[in-house]
Amino acid sequence: MENENNAGEPESTGASRRAFLKQSSVLAAFALTPPAAVHAVEKGLDEKVAVAFEQQPLRVEVNGVAQQLSVEPRVTLLDLLREQLSLTGTKKGCDHGQCGACTVHVDGQRVNSCLTLALTTEGSKVTTIEGLGSVDKLHPMQEAFIKHDGFQCGYCTPGQIMSAVACINEGHANSPDEVREYMSGNICRCGAYANIVEAIMEVKSKGGRI
Amino acid sequence: MNPFQFTRANTPQAAVLAVSKESGAYFLAGGTNLIDLVKREVVIPERLVDINRLPLATIEETASGIRIGAMAKNSAVADHPLIKKHLPLLSMALNAGASAQLRNMATVGGNMMQRTRCPYFYDHSMPCNKRGPVQSGPSKGQPNGPAGCGAIGGVNRMHAIFGTSEKCIAVHPSDMCIALAALDATVNVTGPKGNRSIHFAEFHRLPGDAPQKDNTLLPGELILSVDIPKNELGKYAHYLKVRDRTSYAFALVSVGVAADMKGKTIQDIRLAMGGVAHKPWRLKEAERYLKGKEATLENFKQAATLAMQGAKGYGENDFKLTLAPNSIIEALQIATQTV
């Protein structure tokens, strides 16, 4: 695995592991690979072998739980949460950073998890909608969304709520206009915007960090 | 996404080495544009070199002005007291761009490196001269889609009216860069051949015969910081962004103004436009005309006329020939508080 290059010297070989596997004979690969991978090579499944080799370690705290994971570089934080950690509260909408359904907090900052490579969150604290409140004790923003009917189909709601919490904590919820501007990265096809703004303004009016 | 290798760099030197020794290697900063480009297979990297751990996020006052580290997040710059006080135009431009989430991810260096949002560039079944060849994999070196410019004679409502070529009429998408162009910033970079500084006006380039090149960085060069010289332009500033929605949309036309006024007289002024060219479009003729003149509607109209010399529409974007001068006039009125 290539990893951090602490000495200021990146990985010494220019050829990628994938290229190496593709170029090397099956015999050469045998010496390095676990039995399952050998089997895969025999069946010509080079891609799967390469994937097994290319996973890199990732330590990240998700909703207060320390995770030690093995992740392919191309896996986004969104896919890691949904596919590997089964935290499906975070939604995949556009998967291109345009809709905000995938909004989570990384070290307290709201980000689009669909454009965040999982490996770049090494050592970070990630909070998703599952980590915000619980069924028994909803977060004030979740309560406000229910009270003000801040959703219809609900698909954008986890992203809206994560964004709304950050919006207040950033100090950008001082007026309905400001909320509209700073919530513009969360699209709601049902058009629940008016009620979302009401919910945020109510939580904001109670004061303090949430 | 196509698979790629991933290296985490802990020093700028290591990052430069990692990117310069491999033709399909790219620096990964906030990733808000690059990851999208990788998903759409416009960029097919061999390796991404993660530079998010580099200690380059400082925002500080220097003897000659303000220095912003390349890895400072767009949101951190926009909300920083030094920037709000001395460079309000930059703060306004940053806040006009993208969404709160994206500004939390996007860096100053990455913002400068973002690619055009021309839809032909993002669709490799369509002709585009900007996309360039495939960067890695079995098709390395092969064209990534047909050559030509789909936007010329095609869907070009968002496209350029200044500095175009027969090869490309795409526009530079950044708001931040319009402010940096207006404020005469300098870009400090490091690379395989050492450090150098690039004046902001020379950082981005016009398409000419090589639209695949957005800027004048050499292979492997990494942006370290941006310097903005001290100025007296902090009091009268405005960034006007005209777009299809009130928020979270790219500019049809944007205008950045920063002025120094004495009474009604314009002592000094900087003007730049976005959404109209392949690079931030500085309006030097209009600046020269306005300097020393009174802030009046008549003078603003004349400045806008001067600014529009040489503009050319391509059909769907002809409306920009009217929208742009009107936007210049309105931005000048708001900035100089003469509305």
Image: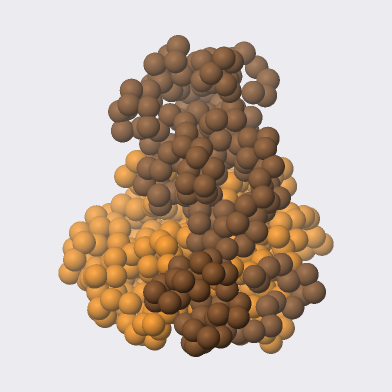
In the rendered image, residue A209, in percent from the top left (x then y), is placed at: 67, 24
Q: Is residue A41 above or below residue B290?
A: below
Q: In this view, does B263 lie above or below B64?
A: above
Side of A99 relative to B103 (left or right): left
Side of B139 relative to A34 (left or right): left
Quadrant holding the N terminus of chain B: bottom left
| The color chain A is rendered in | brown
In the rendered image, residue B265, in percent from the top left (x then y), is placed at: 57, 50
Name the colouring of the figure.
by chain
Compare residues B16 and A49 and report the one nearer the observer: A49
In the rendered image, residue B14, in percent from the top left (x then y), is placed at: 71, 75
* Residue located 45% across and 71% down the image: A40
* Residue located 45% across and 11% down the image: A147
Compare residues A84 and B236 and report the one nearer the observer: A84
In the rendered image, residue A74, in percent from the top left (x then y), is placed at: 50, 61
Compare residues A139 and A199 and report the one nearer the observer: A139
Side of B269 relative to B39 (left or right): right
| The color chain B is rendered in | orange
